[in-house]
Amino acid sequence: MARSFRNRLFHTYSFLITVLFWGIIFFLTFLAAISSCAITCDVTEHSFFLSDSIWTNLLTVLLGAVFCLLLRGLARRCGLAAWLEEDGYFRLCRRILLTLLGLLALVWVLATQFDLVADPLSVQRAAASVLKGKMTPFRTGGYISIYPHQMGLVWLSCPLAAVFGGMNSMVFQLLNVLGVVLLYRELSECCALFGMSRGAQLGVVLLGILFYPFWLYCCFVYGNVLGMAFSVLAMRLELRFLRDGGLKRAFGSAGAACLAVLLKSNYLIFVIGMLVTALVELLRRFNWQRCVLPILLIGALLFQSKVPMALAEKVTGYPLDKGMSTWAWIVMGVEESDRGPGWYSAYPWASLKEVGFDGTRQEEKAKQIALTKLKYYAEHKREALDFFTRKTASQWNNPTFQSYWVAQTRPSRISLPEWVKGFLGRRAEAAASAWLNALQILILAGTLLWCALCRREQRQVSLCFAVTFIGGFVFHLFWEAKCQYTLSYFVLLLPLASGGWAELARLLAGLLSRKGQKTDQRSLLKRSLRQIAPFAAMSLVLCGLIWVLYAHGNNYSLRCDDAAYAAYLAEPEAVDYLEK
């Protein structure tokens, strides 16, 4: 009886997560179908809201289905599908793709050699200061006293600075290249755990090559890339532990999760998603060994929140309080700025300076402002709908995910090659956006296909990705808007998209097969329709809701900057800012 109750509880949880995940992806697909976003290639970081053709996007999805069907047929005719079933051939193919991915990222790093600015510069200065015994960043008003959550990255940067010299951005960038390769290898391994075909497992690496914004971030000397790699490694080890056991996997998962959050505090959401998954699976199938992983994950969270700070206080002699209040970031995230809705403004810094760098006083004021603003939105629902829709579009519906902007606003240590200057030009970026826009709609559509076509057991295993994505989506509704943050969650969709398109190709091949019996094809069609029916019903409900909310010109703000963007593209190219 108890086991039956736990199973019912798990199925309810699975259903609710799937429905919520489906709704979010459907909404993002709606945004991508009718509009797009772009960002200026300078420090103003201004967002443009642009129109897009829904018919072109529908044609893109149709062509994607045809391509996957033809690719499946070609793979079977030439024997590639049979070869991939052999471990040796499959691993060789994946190794070739991962090597190509690593080489592309390596060429990008070596050809650009971008230097440090903004937060990455401050973090590396802090690491160099620790080695020199100069504790200026830790004093009141110093960078680390304001942003103590960066202390983990500072400590991890210290060994690199000790071995390779302080402010050596190239070493970190090369590590990012390794991080990208590790990431996509782990995503491929996750595909196997989700029960996907060998073709889908290779497809996620191919998608990683074609959808290139993430590996362009290798030039970004920050914890985004490495933190993402260790986060997915931690999730893969967790799934293996939950399936096969093994305390080594549990310890490895917790260690990788801790390292990810130390590199970038935003990956705390990934670890929370892992913790939710571990607790749900413990409730579903209880055994004493499964109790270890939640305990280790909680220990990892406590370690990364306490130990780096305590060590910094002991080494520097300066007490580190809470620093800048998180409520200040929420205030910024729910207000308009020159950059866009919820994008960076001077409020967090200005409000902290106003109270003499007292984080507690800042929190009191910021919390009151934030709650007042949220109450205002609750009373003015149309204004809230417009604000949060534009904010969501600006950070999720930019097909480059700010990867060009990160490169365009950084000086280089070298005289940049002409091809790099041409690649980063505003008109070249606009052309690349068309390609990435098509891939973005295919990834979103593939994710919807995965939810609708995969078996229930497969979907339940992949819930850890869905839970993490939901957490990231909700978090960035209220936090600072930035595409470089949402990109990490979007990358989680690549395995699901690859599996979704593979499932569609399998279904279409079965229905169109000349060798198959008509009774078998009818049975396959009936099973597929029964499987798709709930998601089709949800789609109709969501379409109706979207029509009610965005009809009668209420979506105009998503497509209002076409003329301004055209004028922006007509301006002369400016590349001087790319060089020191």
Image (cartoon, helix red, strand yellow):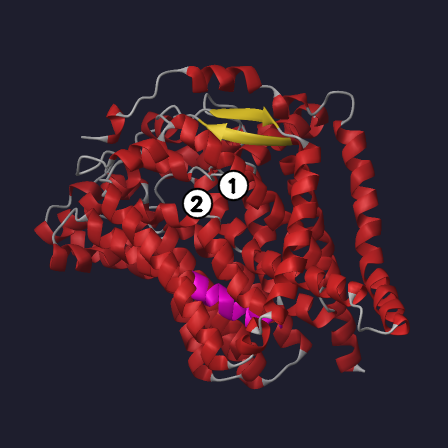
Element assignment for label 1? helix
Q: Is residue 334 left or right of residue 251?
A: right
Question: Which of the 4 image quadrants contains residue 413?
Answer: top left
Q: Is residue 62 left or right of residue 436?
A: right
Q: Is residue 402 visible?
A: yes
Q: Closest to the observer: 309 or 95? A: 95
Task: Considering the whole magenta stretch, tell me its main secondary structure.
Answer: helix
Give the residues in magenta: 184-198
Q: Which residue is mark 2?
A: 213
In the picture shown, does residue 20 fall above or below 330? below
- Sequence-wise, the earlier of marks 1 and 2 is 2
How far is the residue under mark 1 from the one under mark 2? 9 Å
Q: Is residue 440 left or right of residue 142?
A: right
Q: Amino acid at mark 2?
A: Pro
Say the numbered circle drawn on residue 436.
1
Where does residue 346 sit, x and y in percent of width and height? 38, 26
